[in-house]
Amino acid sequence: MSSGDSTTPVPATLPLQTDPRTGRGVRIFWGALLFLGLAAWATAGGCGEAGRWWRALLINFIFFTPMAAGLVVWSAVLLVSRSGWHGSLEGRALAGIGFALPSVMALILLWVESPAVSPWPAHAGSPHAVWLAPNALFSRDLAALLVFWILAGCYVRLRAQRRGATLGGVLILVYCLVFSLLAFDLVMTLDPKWTSALFGGYFFMSGLYIAMTAWTWMAAWQRNANPNQLHDLGRLMVTFSIITVYMMYSQLLPIWYENLPGEVPFVIPRLLPGPWTPVSAAILGVVYLGPLVMLLTIRAKRTPRIIGTVASVVLVGLWVERWWLVAPTFDPSPRLGLPEIAVAAAFAGALGLGMSMFGQRAAAAAVPGSQP
């Protein structure tokens, strides 16, 4: 990575939260955001458009769950590759385990509400009816997600003891398999006429991109941010933006030159001239190619305010990309309003609160004499 590889100190233990600003005030902020999001959901969710509220839950599940899970996996990636530049930033990544319970609860809620509002029961006569049956679909997805979070929890425990390289390699593989399954089951099958062998790969790679961007955002806005670490994080952001756009291009090119009818349903509402075209163009400019331009210079990658702002913009763009994966299947034109924003606020609050609370407790366990 950068010249800071050998100079970044690595603590003898791995406290999962070191920023002094992370305390009661931060937890109050995230808790308030969670409460407001849930309150808006509870008061307005029953006022019609139940399917839209369910899809808002799905959109935010497939954004925040790969983010939190990917943060833990990034620790494993760097451990397996024997990288040492991240130093104390690893604690912020490991704190992603704090979202394990909210993500499982969200998937269970999707399951409970699916018979009434999801599209799968409507395809009972299709050749994929057995696979698309809600109970079969959600039971395997829930089992897969639980396996991942259990392994992630064991890995985090080992990392606090400066171990975990072997389990880290297993965790990376399980992440790829689990989030490929979630991509096929929860996104691709929304339209049973759409098939894509590459979509699982695109989904878990873009999930790692979301996690890397979130990690960069957290590192940039902490006190005394290390320019060497920010430089390396910025380079990884650029790399994964290129990989993600390549994975999407690898799906679109065969559709064009082979004229694949099974994959055209994804292209028509999103890429042909129509109401969704501006959204697609914005995603291309912000998410896929934005970091390559905005983080082109060394100064941009090493300046906390610049890279923090870029990470903020890209994170919003990545959330829009998840919305873009789901909504055009059901809405002929974009509709972004209270359902999507309220549920996003609830998920963001749950993620921030979980990471903050878990980080504080883990730091007290890892550092002798510290207080929660």
Image: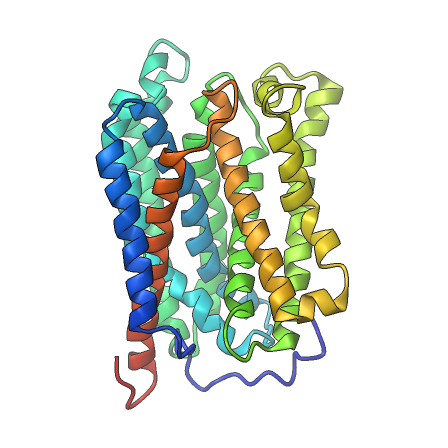
Question: Where does the image place residue 21, in percent across and percent down from the top left?
Answer: 40, 75
* Foreground pick, 174 / 41: 41
Residue drawn at x 22%, y 37% as measured from the top left: 42
In the picture provided, is 2 more to the left or to the right than 217?
right
Q: Is residue 13 above or below residue 127?
A: below
In the rendered image, is residue 15 in sight? yes
Image quarter of the N terminus: bottom right
Question: Where does the image place residue 242, in percent across and percent down from the top left?
Answer: 70, 48
Residue drawn at x 67%, y 80% as measured from the top left: 4
In the picture provided, is 115 more to the left or to the right than 99?
left
Image quadrant assignment for residue 312 = bottom right
Q: How many marks?
A: 0
Image quarter of the C terminus: bottom left
The single residue placed furthest to the top in the displayed view is 125
Image quadrant assignment for residue 318 = top right
Q: Is residue 262 above or below residue 142?
A: above
In the rendered image, is residue 170 in sight? no
Question: Where does the image place residue 188, in percent across and percent down from the top left?
Answer: 48, 28
Which color scheme did the rendering employ for the protein?
rainbow
In the picture provided, is 13 more to the left or to the right than 213?
left
Residue drawn at x 57%, y 41% as measured from the top left: 201
* Foreground pick, 336 / 330: 336
* Foreground pick, 141 / 327: 327
The single residue placed furthest to the bottom in the displayed view is 369
Question: Where does the image place residue 302, in percent across and percent down from the top left?
Answer: 68, 71
Q: Is residue 258 above or below residue 152?
A: above
Residue drawn at x 50%, y 47% as measured from the top left: 176
